[in-house]
Image (cartoon, rainbow, N blue to C red):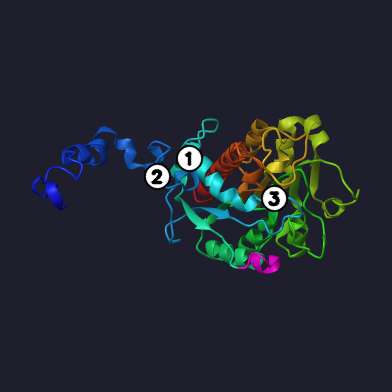
Amino acid sequence: MGGEFAAFPDTDSYGVAKSRIAHRLGSTVMADYPEFQDPMQRPRYTGIPTFMRAPYADDLDGVDIGLVGVPFDGGVTNRTGARHGPREIRNQSSLMRRINQATGVCPYDLARVADIGDAWVESPFNLETAIGEIAAFYHRVHQAGIVPVSAGGDHSITLPVMRGIAAHRPVGMVHFDAHCDTGDDYLGSRFHHGAPFRRAVEEGLLDPKRTIQIGIRGPLNDADIWSFSHETGMRVIYIEEFYELGVKGVIEEIHRVAGTGPTYLSFDVDGLDPVYAPGTGTPEVGGFSTLEAQMMIRACQGLELVGGDVVEVAPPFDPSGNTALVGATIMYEILCVVADAWARARA
């Protein structure tokens, strides 16, 4: 360093002893607090935000479970904003810790987990092209042997995720939502966020008889809008039945319907009552609680899970950040059961 401090090699340009800097930032700190070797153990206000403070991996080699952001809401039919979901979920996910206290699962001990970035699109104004770009990203992820756990984005993104990971065989699905998302054409599009699972069945990606949809409710303009779900054999649990069965009864149905075989878990935050997640595009009053959601996801342990997502977090509608925190928590719960499934499959 130059100037008047050049003659004082043991101080920096502000006259602070270099040994003190080394003590704060170097090996002495790590010796005093060896757990800080793991960035996930450091104070949560530090570091570059990644999902769960997991390491960022630009290279797909050496990753077992990839945490992915899909900042796309071109399939929204009304209130946009979910494109901002992944960034804010990353921020709020710094509040997650390593071990799931309820189940004892530490996903980072079971698999190599990394944030592998965003499946961002170069043509966001062309819905079908954008969906194709997202599918190509997930195809690369699948070819690399990585199981994806994703944050959207609107619910149209689940179709290209399935195109990427289920092209060789259909998957079952555990689906939490206020809407079945098995509609059809709307304003000239068949690929909006109200139709991904109809398209997935038609494309042979989703097995409807191994699909359960939980929390369905809300007023309709067309009484038959979700007829595709019923006609193809999906198990639809409307919110009234949800509370008749109770969480334990719903869990029994999840395992009965999903059974054995590859299964995907998709969680739309509008499945929650909007008191828990107001920051979403299509809120519907009368949903289940965050605790009930956590209990149901945790009970998916034992299924052959091949991926999962949390979608429809729209931060502009919730400046408090609470909906993004809910999204991060749900993503963590999904990560735990996916990591458990990954480890069991390789035991």
Q: Describe residue 63's horizontal placement relative to residue 217 as left or right.
A: left
Residue 145 is covered by the magenta coloring: no
- Residue at 69% x, 44% y is 280
Q: Nearer the viewer, mark 1 or mark 3?
A: 1
Q: Describe residue 240's horizontal placement relative to residue 124 as left or right.
A: right
Residue position marked by numbered label 1 in the rendering:
94
Could you tell me the amino acid type at mark 3? Met
Pick whichever of labels 1 and 2 is earlier in the sequence.
Answer: 2
Could you tell me the amino acid type at mark 1? Ser
- In front here: 16 or 86? 16
Q: Mark 1 packing: few (<14 Cα in 10 Å), some, or many (20+)?
A: many
Pick whichever of labels 2 and 3 is earlier in the sequence.
Answer: 2
Q: Is residue 27 visible?
A: yes
Real-space Cα separation, disc 1 to disc 2, in angstroms: 10 Å
Q: Describe residue 339's horizontal placement relative to residue 132 as left or right.
A: left
Q: Mark 3 packing: few (<14 Cα in 10 Å), some, or many (20+)?
A: many
Residue position marked by numbered label 3 in the rendering:
173
Q: Please, what secondary structure does the residue beneath circle 3 have?
A: strand
Residue position marked by numbered label 2 in the rendering:
47
The percent position of residue 126, horizontal first and vertical second, equals 68, 68
The percent position of residue 83, horizontal first and vertical second, equals 62, 53
First to last magenta residue range:
123-130
Asked if the residues shown at circle 1 and circle 3 are in contact, with their CB atoms under 8 angstroms apart, the answer is no
Q: Describe residue 159's horizontal placement relative to residue 113 as left or right.
A: right
Quadrant in the picture for residue 271: top right
